[in-house]
Amino acid sequence: MADTFQPSSLVYTPPRHPSQNLRTLLAYVDARNHLAPDIMKFFHATLEHRYLPKSLGRPVLNRRQYGEYISQLQPMFASFRMTLHQVIETGDTIVYHATAVGESVCGVPYDNEYMSTVQFVVGDYGPQICYVKEYVDSKKTTEFFKEHRARVAENNRRRSQLVSQGS
């Protein structure tokens, strides 16, 4: 079963007294897992977000652009669950390894792996994320979006046929 996704068996356990930055990261992951509409509260006005590797052809996004992207991305998912496997913190920076599983609203399974570097600044209500380098599994990402778009197109075609048959 080489195609079966096997996330790491190592699951990160936060320290008993996490730093403010780590608490912010953990709250952000929890918000992503709940597809929370207020996800952007974790990001500072100066946000610079990069999806890598460069071969994905994704532009660098500022806070407004990332917010627009997330507002289109989240409704695609019926379920989403990110699991942290390793977290390394130093100063204002956290590096983490995570996997995510889920399903699109069209029934396309989602599984991906991330390696991210996040930097924090002090915001109005505590630490906020100001810089992200998010490495994703480029093959899995490309396959997921391709399959999701194909299913959306097929569903739209079927709806059109039903409407035209009912007329």
Image (spheres, rainbow, N blue to C red):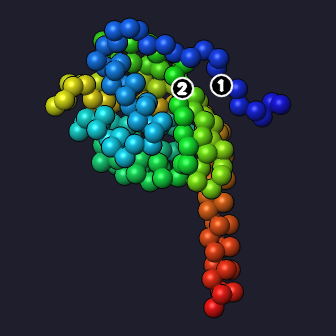
- Type of residue at label 2? Thr
Residue at disc 1, secondary structure: loop
Residue 25 picture location, percent across and down: 37, 25
- Considering every residue shown, the one lying at the far left of the view is 124
**Quarter of the image with the C terminus in it:** bottom right
* Left or right: 165, with 104 as reference point: right
**The N terminus - image quarter:** top right
Between marks 2 and 1, how big is the CA–CA gap?
9 Å
Depicted 167 relative to depicted 32: above or below: below
Where is residue 149? Give x, y as percent.
61, 58
Q: Residues within 10 Å of mark 2 (few under 14, many from 20)?
A: many
Q: Residue at x 76, y 33 (%)?
A: 4
In the depicted structure, whether residue 118 falls above or below residue 88: below
Q: Which residue is mark 2?
A: 83
- Amino acid type at circle 1 is Pro
Mark 1: few/some/many CA within 10 Å (<14, 14-19, 20+)? some
Callout 2–callout 1 Cβ contact below 8 Å: yes
What residue is drawn where x is 39% and y is 12%? 89
Along the line of sight, the residue nearer the viewer: 116 or 59:
116
Dot 2 or dot 1: first in sequence order is: 1
In the orientation shown, which residue stands out farthest toward the bottom? 167
